[in-house]
Image (cartoon, rainbow, N blue to C red):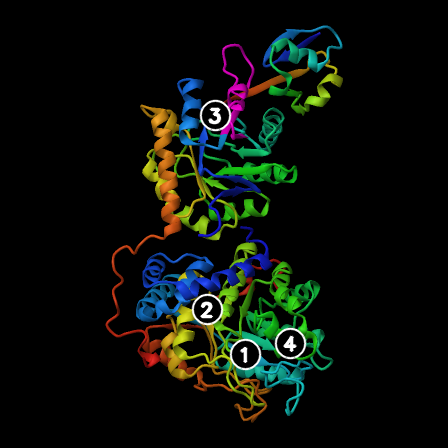
């Protein structure tokens, strides 16, 4: 299936979990926030959040800002 | 500091009391230069170190009054609806145990009195009763408000603490302000002078002003009856109470009055002698720390004092007052049945002439209900 | 003053009254050095999509002892986006603090008061420690206080403009009316302006560009720290009179018969 990950198309096996997508980034899971289709998904929910074709996923980290 | 907790605000007032004894002239000069709306500033100005700088305080008070209120003084008249009272305030001429002829104004008499006040040109009236009693209960007061609001754009009440629902009803009927003095913020002294009756409930009285504001009252007037307890502590507590109300209910107005105890029927003598100089200093100190709050001075005060304070700190004054029930229509012939004696019995023309001579314009009306939600007919 | 002079925001205590923004630095190392040089205890950070080549600040900031993070909502154009950003920021930082900034106009970056108010109402109910970045509007400041904000952050002038305290009179008014800390955020250029804000009674100052864009950001951070501390000290000490009060020719106290 196709999802939009941080604004770009990405291919994942059908039924992939949000945790698996986070793992792909190589970042520590506690150091990112995840948003699926405009809803923030708390860390504890990621392993039970099954993604669907066309989902829009954002993985955010902290950056410099004022 | 949590400014939204009244008890805590009053504790800060008590803590600031110590500062009054140790303040230096240098501190007074610094506060005079840049007064702040905090109790520490007020404490410094109340100290004896400020006594030598009264002229500078007065000058600053006049400039601040002028810049916030213009060269004007707002005028109002008190109307005593009833002098029935179940209260046991040892300092009050209307207390239940005083030899006093009791009466209340009936509907037609209220009209007549209001007519007389209206005739003087006044448009701001304050309706007064004693503590809640069968002769002068909520419905009676509500009737007074209803009648007054038909002719007067500004109607206030000074009566007994009420429930929020009752305050809301008064607002509905056209009441725009509540005046309720704590009398004394000193708990022990409060218990002592309020010998019996509903007024013994210190907390209920303390909370009443904000209860009225929650009910939608446009403004509240608070005050301490100076002379009952340590006047410095009273001033600090009063200030904190005002600041608390002003910050928490920031859409509402807060006014402050400075009544001092005078001997009345029954021979109650004040514990603390409050001299002219001291009272003037307190009022100027409040003006410096709260530049935009109306400060009120009544006809309890002598003409010379009132004239000197008009526009110099004080921005709102009662005029041509009668403190006896039915006093306006009978020309003040009511005799001895007054709550307290009037020291300024000048008529309105004479008083206004005095204001004009001092470059001040008397203001009879500066608000009406034209734009108010659900404006009365 | 007997009581300690800590900055208390939403029940959290800080010794330092200088808050730094973490953006616009040449690199992360300089930013971290500036934060340390300033003795900062609270910094604001933004949220960005993870991508290769962008420094993730989470780990390096976590190594700074005693530092509280305040994620901001920059990039949000409305209340909905800001709430989403705040929730995401809390996920990563574990901090209840959030700086709500919503600027729909990408040029002057002035905050949208209506969207900001809506976002703050929602976030305060959700137990965030909410610090909104606002225009220096005393009424808006009170509305936000009522909504449960822990502090308000009026701007001195436009973000990054370096125009200093253009809104000084309004900030003074906000301070005199406010029951919560008032923090000047945005527009400052020189440490003297930070000191002026503190002398007037501001509880803290937030700067970013003024430090990040200085010739030597680390030294400038230290300079701001000293200015903020000096301004606070001066506020506590009470300033002397400006000029002399002229005494009226006919004394105003004559009626007192002294």
The label nearer to you, 4 versus 3, is 3
Q: Nearer the viewer, mark 2 or mark 3?
A: 3
Q: Calculate the distance from the C-alpha at mark 4 to the C-alpha at mark 3.
A: 62 Å
The residue pinned by badge 1 equals B78
Q: Secondary structure at mark 4?
A: helix
> In the rendering, which numbered label is found on residue B295?
2
Residues in magenta?
C44-71
Q: Name which quarter of the figure residue B217 lies in.
A: bottom right
- Cα distance between the residues tagged 2 and 1: 16 Å
| Discs 2/1, front | 2
Q: Secondary structure at mark 2?
A: strand
Q: Is residue C165 visible?
A: no
Residue drawn at x 57%, y 34% as measured from the top left: C97
Determine if residue B368 is in view: yes
- Where residue B275 appears, as percent x and y from the top left, is 42, 79
Q: Residues within 10 Å of mark 3 (few under 14, many from 20)?
A: many
CB atoms of marks 3 and 1 within 8 Å: no
- Mark 4 highlights which residue? B144
Q: Residues within 10 Å of mark 2 (few under 14, many from 20)?
A: many
**Mark 3 sits on what residue?**
A65
Label 3 in the same subunit as label 1: no
Marks 4 and 1, how far apart in space? 13 Å
Would residue B156 be found to the left or right of residue A17 on screen? left
Mark 4 belongs to chain: B
Q: Please state the chain letter of the residue tagged with numbered disc 1 in the rendered image.
A: B
Q: Position of residue B263 (x, y in %)?
A: 52, 87
Q: CA distance from mark 3 to mark 1?
A: 60 Å
Q: Nearer the viewer, mark 4 or mark 1?
A: 1
């Amino acid at each position: 299936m196709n999802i939009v990950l941080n604004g770009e198309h990405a291919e994942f096996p059908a039924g992939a979990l949000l945790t698996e997508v986070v793992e792909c980034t190589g970042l520590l899971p506690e150091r990112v926030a995840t948003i699926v289709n405009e809803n923030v998904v708390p860390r504890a929910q990621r392993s039970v959040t099954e993604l669907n074709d066309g989902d829009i996923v954002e993985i955010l980290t902290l950056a410099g800002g004022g | 500091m949590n400014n939204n907790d009244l008890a805590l605000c009053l504790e800060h007032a008590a803590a600031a009391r110590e500062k009054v004894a140790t303040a230096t002239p240098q501190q007074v000069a610094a506060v005079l230069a840049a007064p702040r709306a905090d109790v520490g500033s007020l404490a410094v100005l109340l100290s004896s170190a400020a006594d030598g700088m009264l002229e500078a305080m007065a000058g600053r008070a006049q400039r601040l009054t002028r810049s916030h209120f213009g060269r004007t003084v707002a005028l109002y008249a008190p109307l005593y609806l009833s002098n029935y009272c179940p209260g046991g305030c040892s300092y009050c001429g209307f207390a239940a145990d005083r030899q006093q002829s009791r009466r209340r104004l009936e509907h037609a008499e209220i009209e007549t009195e209001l007519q007389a006040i209206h005739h003087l040109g006044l448009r701001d009236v304050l309706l007064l009763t004693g503590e809640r009693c069968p002769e002068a209960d909520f419905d009676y007061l509500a009737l007074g408000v209803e009648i007054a609001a038909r002719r007067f754009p500004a109607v206030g009440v000074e009566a007994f603490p009420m429930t929020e629902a009752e305050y809301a009803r008064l607002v509905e009927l056209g009441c725009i302000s509540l005046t309720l003095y704590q009398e004394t913020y000193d708990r022990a002294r409060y218990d002592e002078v309020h010998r019996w009756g509903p007024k013994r409930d210190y907390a209920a009285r303390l909370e009443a002003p904000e209860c009225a504001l929650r009910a939608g009252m446009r403004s509240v007037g608070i005050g301490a009856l100076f002379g009952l307890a340590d006047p410095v502590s009273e001033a600090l507590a009063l200030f904190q109470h005002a600041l608390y109300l002003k910050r928490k209910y920031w859409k509402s107005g807060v006014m402050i009055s400075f009544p001092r105890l005078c001997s009345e029927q029954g021979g109650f003598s004040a514990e603390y002698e409050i001299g002219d100089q001291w009272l003037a200093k307190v009022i100027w100190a409040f003006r410096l720390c709260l530049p935009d709050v109306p400060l009120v001075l009544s006809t309890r005060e002598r003409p010379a004092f009132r004239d000197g304070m008009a526009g110099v700190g004080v921005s709102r004054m009662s005029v041509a007052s009668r403190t006896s029930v039915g006093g306006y229509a009978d020309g003040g012939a009511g005799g001895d049945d007054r709550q307290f004696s009037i020291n300024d019995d000048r008529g309105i023309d004479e008083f206004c002439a005095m204001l004009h001579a001092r470059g001040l314009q008397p203001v009879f009306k500066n608000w009406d209900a034209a734009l108010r939600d659900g404006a009365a007919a | 003053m007997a009581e300690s002079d800590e900055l208390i925001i939403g029940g959290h205590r800080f010794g330092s009254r200088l808050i730094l923004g973490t953006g616009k630095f040449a690199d992360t190392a300089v930013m971290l050095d500036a934060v340390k040089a300033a003795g900062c205890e609270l910094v604001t950070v933004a949220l960005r999509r993870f991508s290769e080549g962008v420094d993730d600040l989470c780990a390096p900031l976590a190594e700074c002892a005693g530092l509280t993070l305040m994620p901001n909502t920059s990039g949000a154009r409305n209340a909905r986006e800001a709430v989403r950003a705040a929730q995401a920021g809390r996920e990563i930082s574990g901090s209840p603090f959030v700086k709500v900034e919503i600027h729909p106009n990408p040029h002057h970056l002035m905050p949208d008061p209506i969207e900001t108010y809506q976002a703050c109402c929602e976030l305060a109910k959700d137990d965030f420690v909410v610090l909104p970045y606002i225009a220096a509007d005393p009424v808006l400041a009170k509305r936000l206080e009522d909504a449960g904000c822990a502090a308000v952050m009026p701007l001195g002038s436009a973000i990054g403009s370096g125009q200093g305290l253009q809104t000084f009179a309004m900030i003074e008014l906000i301070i005199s009316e406010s029951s919560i800390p008032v923090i000047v955020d945005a527009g400052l250029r020189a440490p003297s302006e930070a000191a002026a804000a503190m002398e007037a009674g501001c509880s803290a100052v937030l700067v970013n560009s003024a430090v990040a864009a200085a010739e030597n950001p680390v030294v400038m951070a230290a300079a701001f720290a000293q200015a903020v501390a000096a301004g606070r000290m001066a506020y506590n000490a009470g300033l002397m009179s400006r000029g002399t009060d002229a005494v009226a020719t006919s004394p105003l106290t004559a009626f007192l018969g002294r």
